[in-house]
Amino acid sequence: MTTSPPAARPLFDAILFDCDGVLVDSEPITNGVLRDMLIELGWQISARECVDRFIGKAIKDELGVIASHTGVTVGDEWIAEFRERRNVALADRLVAVDGAPDVVREIAGVYGDRIAVASGADLHKVHLQLEKVGLIEFFEGRTFSGMDTARSKPAPDVYLLAASSLGVAPDRCVVVEDTPTGVRAGVAAGATVVGYAAGLDAKAAETLTAAGAATVIGDLRDLPEFAIEPAVPVAPRETA
């Protein structure tokens, strides 16, 4: 009788991915649109400052900051225009983070439907991006937005919602995040957080570690090593 070799096994109960900066390379595009619109309001903000101030945060939570630098209190109409201009730019130029399609496919092969996206962005944006880069099929029915919860990241709400929807305990989840705001959200949920800093940029890695990441990877292809127990090869049987 022949036996099948043991398969690779998950080391956790679920994996929860942030979207922007983890699965899709959207941050430069989104922040570029935001910066253009802030300059139009009179804030001569640099590209670097725009990233530092707004990355990983919901625009609706930063209206006071915008008003303090522009003297303009923006509302729903301005936010709607931002989203429209952002979506056009994303549909035109968005690409997946290097290695993300292969990694998601490998993770899904082991974890099945116990993977989800938990983003701070609106669900329309999340779906647009996942469809654009060909990843939506892996997360059907398992995409969650912090805009649909009482509190945005760094509060843990969206990660708690995702874990509950998958039927797993938050402390048995891996969260994959690229910003300190997102890392703090994952830690607050009780999850084990893997920080992603492209190229293992030293400053970014230090910031993610300080926020509570259990480990930091510079290549998304290193995630399976952290989250999957590899199959043990079966030794060949000796014959007489």
Image: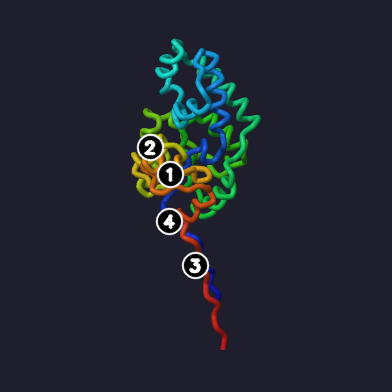
The tag earlier along the polypeptide, 3 or 2, is 2
Tell whether label 4 touches label 2 (CB within 8 Å).
no
The tag earlier along the polypeptide, 2 or 1, is 1
Amino acid on which disc 2 is placed: Ala
Left or right of 101 in this view: 175: left
Residue receiving disc 3: 232
Tell whether label 1 touches label 2 (CB within 8 Å).
yes
Residue receiving disc 1: 175
Q: What residue lies at 49% left-to-right and 52% top-to-bottom?
A: 111
Q: Position of residue 128 (x, y in %)?
A: 58, 32
Amino acid on which disc 3 is placed: Val
Q: Position of residue 61 (x, y in %)?
A: 41, 23
Using the image, determine if residue 135 lies above or below residue 32: below
Identify the element where label 4 is drawn: loop
Determine which quarter of the picture holds residue 91: top right
Real-space Cα distance between discs 3 and 2?
Answer: 35 Å
